[in-house]
Image (cartoon, rainbow, N blue to C red):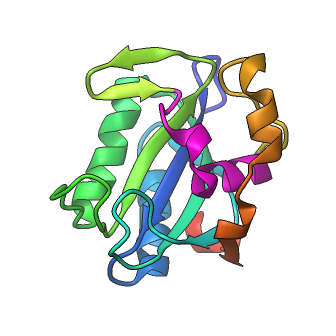
């Protein structure tokens, strides 16, 4: 990697079923081992109450910064491969899951397709995404100046609690 075609991609990950810590770590390792994908940085891991459907276990969430030579569809396929490999079942929207891997930001791309919207359409509403994203990119504005106030505030930090941080050696083989 290191060529002009490398893209900077932020991925949001969450888990609230099974061994949540191991699920996230396995997802990071799998992505880092894929052709054309390299994890550059990983935020701290945050414990958060569920969003959408509340009657389920708490989540562990993180954001990873990835360098990739893949296009957005190729990156989506990588995320879905990881979810499938780790037993993700899409039974109900916002329901419990062993792993969730979402593309948040792909360079400065704005894309709207039926199954892929970049930047992620609801990330600004979700503290469990914005707090770890801002940890990696303080003051980062994904879609323009109009979002700056919401991002710098990241209201609701009290709902996300830093749990721990992986050592780079844990996820980077």
* Residue 3 sits in quarter: top right
Tell me which residue sits at (52%, 50%) in the image.
12
- Tell me: residue 18, above or below residue 155: below
Q: Is residue 165 visible?
A: no
Q: Quadrant of residue 65?
A: top right
Q: Residue at x 75, y 38 (%)?
A: 151
Left or right of 87 on screen, residue 131: right
Between 23 and 71, the one lying in front of the other is: 23
Which quadrant is the N terminus positioned in?
Answer: top right
Identity of the residue drawn at 30% across and 37% down: 77
How many discs appear?
0
| Nearer to us in this view, 23 or 7 | 23
Q: Secondary structure of the magenta portion, mostly?
A: helix
Q: Position of residue 68 (x, y in %)?
A: 53, 33
Magenta stretch contains residue 133: yes
Note whether 5 is above or below 151 in the view shown. above
Compared with residue 105, is residue 17 higher up or lower down, i.e. above or below?
Answer: below
Q: In x, y percent, where is residue 122?
A: 49, 38
| Rendered position, 107 above or below 23 | above
Residue 103 seen in this snapshot: yes
Residue 120 in magenta stretch: yes
Residue plotted at (36% across, 63% down): 99
Residue 58, percent from left and from top: 46, 76
As drawn, the residue found furthest toward the left would be: 91
* Quadrant in which the C terminus appears: bottom right
Q: Going by the picture, which residue comes out furthest to the bottom? A: 19
Which is more toward the observer, 23 or 127? 127
Q: Quadrant of residue 35?
A: top left
Q: Which residues are magenta?
A: 119-136
Residue 123 place in picture, x, y as percent? 55, 41
């Amino acid at each position: 990697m290191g060529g002009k075609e490398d893209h900077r991609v932020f991925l949001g990950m969450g888990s609230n079923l099974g061994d949540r810590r191991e699920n996230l770590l396995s997802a990071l390792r799998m992505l880092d081992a894929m052709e054309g994908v390299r994890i550059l940085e990983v935020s701290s891991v945050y414990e958060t109450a569920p969003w959408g459907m509340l009657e389920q276990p708490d989540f562990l969430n993180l954001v990873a910064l990835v360098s990739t030579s893949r296009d957005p569809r190729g990156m989506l396929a990588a995320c879905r491969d990881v979810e499938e490999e780790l037993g993700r079942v899409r039974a109900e929207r916002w329901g419990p899951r062993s792993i969730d891997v979402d593309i948040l930001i792909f360079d400065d791309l704005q894309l709207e397709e039926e199954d892929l919207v970049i930047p992620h359409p609801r990330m600004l509403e979700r503290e469990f995404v914005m707090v770890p994203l801002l940890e990696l990119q303080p003051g980062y504005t994904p879609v323009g100046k109009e979002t700056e106030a919401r991002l710098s505030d990241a209201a609701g930090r009290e709902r996300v609690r830093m749990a721990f941080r992986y050592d780079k050696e844990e996820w980077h083989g």
